[in-house]
Each structure stands twice: as C-alpha cells, then as structure tokens.
Image (cartoon, rainbow, N blue to C red):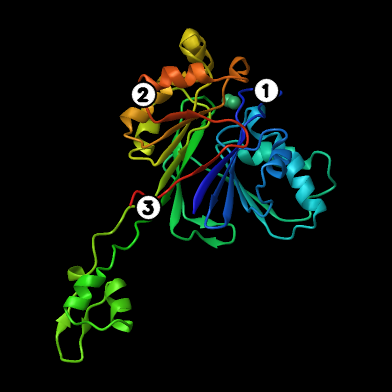
Amino acid sequence: MLSVTFLGTSAARPTVERNVSGVALVREGETLLFECGEGTQRQMMRFGVSFALSEIFFTHFHADHFLGVIGLVRTLGLQARAEPMRLYGPKGAKKLLTQALQLGVERVPFEIEIEEVKPGMVLRETGNGKRDAYEIQVFATEHGGGSVGYALREHERRGRFDVEKARAAGIPEGPLWGKLTRGESVTTDDGRRMTPSDFVGPNRPGRLVVFTGDTRPCASVVDAAQGADLLIHEATFGEEEKDRAKETGHSTAREAAQIALAAKARRLVLSHVSARYSISAEELVKEAREVFMETAVAKDGMTIEVPFRD
Ligand SMILES: [Zn+2]
Ligand SMILES: [Zn+2]
C-alpha cells in the first residue's frame, strides 16, 4: 500500500480552509513527512497520520515549509520518544534546523540527525538502516537558495510466476516454484532442468511519487518525474497571475500541467495554492486540464492511493 495525505495545501500563509505545507506519505506502514509548516502536528492528528515517523524531508527553508518542526519535535519529546529522527534539507539545513530545534526547549530528549542534501543524491539509508524496496532521489528545483524536490522510487518487482505453464511442464507445486520465482534454475525429480525465464515474466516497475515543493517549471523536474505515477507539483497561481508566478519563483497551474505532460506522468495533483483559491481552486484545475487531463487540486485532509500499474 502507498498513499499520500495532504496536511497543508496553502501557499505562504494558512487560511481558514487550508494549512501551510505538509504532505505525509505512507508506504507499507512506514510514514514519511515532506515539509512541516506551522500547525502540521495538529493536521496530523486531525487526519490520522501517525507520529511514529523517523524522517522529515524539507525542500527549502521558507517559513511556511518548516516552522512546524519546532512544535512537532517538542510534542514528540513530551511523549517520551526515544527513537532517533533524521531531517533532510538543502544547504543551510544544519544551521537553520539546529537553531529552530533549540527554541523553547532545554533539550530534545531524543537524537536528531540533520543531513544536508543536494541534487543528484540518492538516499538509500534511513537513520535506522537500509530502505526496504525503494529509494529517495533528490533533484534540483528553481526556487532559489538551493531548493530541491524529492522522488520516491520503488525498486522493480519480480515478474509474475506463470502457474499454468509450470503445471503444464509437470513441475510440482512447492519449493521448486519458490526457487523459480526467485530466479533460480531447478531440476525436477525426473531429471529435467528448468530455467526461471521460461516461467517468470519480466520484472515489473515499482511506483514513482514525485514531490516538487516550491518551484518555477523546470527541466530537472521533468527529468525526475519521467513516468511518475503521481506528480505533486506546486501551483501557487492561475494564468492571470503568471507574471507574478515568474517574479516570485512559483508556477501556475497550467505550467505544472505542462511539466506533467512533458514527464508523461500518470497523474498530477496541484498544491501550495494562493489564498485567493483557498475556498475554490476549480479555476486552477480547469486551466491545468486544458493541458493535462489527469489533474486534481489537493485540499487539506485529502488522501490519494497510488496503485501499481499492473
Ligand atoms: Zn511556500
Ligand atoms: Zn518558498
């Protein structure tokens, strides 16, 4: 199972309807947090996102993306958390997050590790060991200050075992099936040698979920999001404010759609919308769908399941 829950979908400041940035990704029971704007911990409680997480990924250090980490860490401390936590962010993360975490507490009662990332890095390890069956890729975005985005890419899965074919070839159900599935050749009781490629289909792709954070539309996002099952792209403005989007390092909904189209993504979800779209962001969806049909706009509390392609 892989799902994404939007905790905050407003740009720059919270509104009555929307909190500032925060996205929880839950994969096989593990929770990862992307951004942690002010009030994120309360959004987690409201929308049933577990506090048992060990990693938070920051795309850049504008206030609306990270101030919530101060309160969240304090709450976790009060809950007597013992497990370490790892925070990731671009250049400056160590200094900024260290300062932020020192606010309002004598000391944090559990270990927090801060890792500075840069585009091209692949995060295969967590604070607690190796990532199981996926990796996090860091890519460049265009928002100034070394901003980055993150792509969660699952490893390929083994091909399907063709049960009918195995039965027809007289291979008895049992350990031999298991060996063939794992890619090992086997010999039947009557001495016939069987190779896995005859019974196991080609490897099947894993899923790809891409989170841009704030950015102008850019080629590095298109590259990172090639064939993405889900692209979460910021869309702060509509077409009528496209000049403002350019001046402030943000994207319009239409520009986000052009990125999704160029990347041949399966699905686009817009987030980080300006306060004027807080109540209804239908205008943004309409503009984006003229370019890329499979578009939705996030709202706080929305959860999206990301299925396998096959
Ligand atoms: Zn922002
Ligand atoms: Zn920003």
Q: Nearer the viewer, residue 115 or 68?
A: 68
Residue of label 2: 258
Residue of label 3: 206
Q: Nearer the viewer, residue 282 or 134?
A: 282
- For ligand 2, give the image quadrant: top right
| Residue at the bottom extreme of this rendering | 190
Q: Is residue 154 above or below residue 225?
A: below
Confirm or reject: label 1 Cβ below 8 Å from ligand 1.
Answer: no
The Cα atoms of the two marked residues, 1 and 3, are separated by 35 Å
Q: Amino acid at mark 1?
A: Arg
Question: In the rendered structure, which disc, 2 or 3, sits on the residue that comes first in sequence?
Answer: 3
Q: Amino acid at mark 3?
A: Gly
Q: Is residue 270 above or below residue 121?
A: above
Q: Residues within 10 Å of mark 3 (few under 14, many from 20)?
A: some
The Cα atoms of the two marked residues, 1 and 2, are separated by 26 Å
Question: In the rendered structure, which disc, 1 or 2, sits on the residue that comes first in sequence?
Answer: 1
Point out residue 274 in the picture as x, y percentages from the top left corner: 59, 18
Residue of label 1: 13
In this orientation, does residue 309 appear? yes
Q: Residues within 10 Å of mark 2 (few under 14, many from 20)?
A: some
Q: Is residue 253 above or below residue 134?
A: above
Secondary structure at badge 1 equals loop
Q: What's the residue at 27%, 75% (across, down)?
A: 180
Q: Amino acid at mark 2?
A: Gln
Point out residue 67 in the picture as x, y percentages from the top left corner: 70, 34
Secondary structure at badge 2 equals helix
Q: Quadrant of residue 101?
A: top right
Q: Nearer the viewer, residue 59 or 146?
A: 59
Secondary structure at badge 3 equals loop
Question: In the rendered structure, which disc, 1 or 3, sits on the residue that comes first in sequence?
Answer: 1
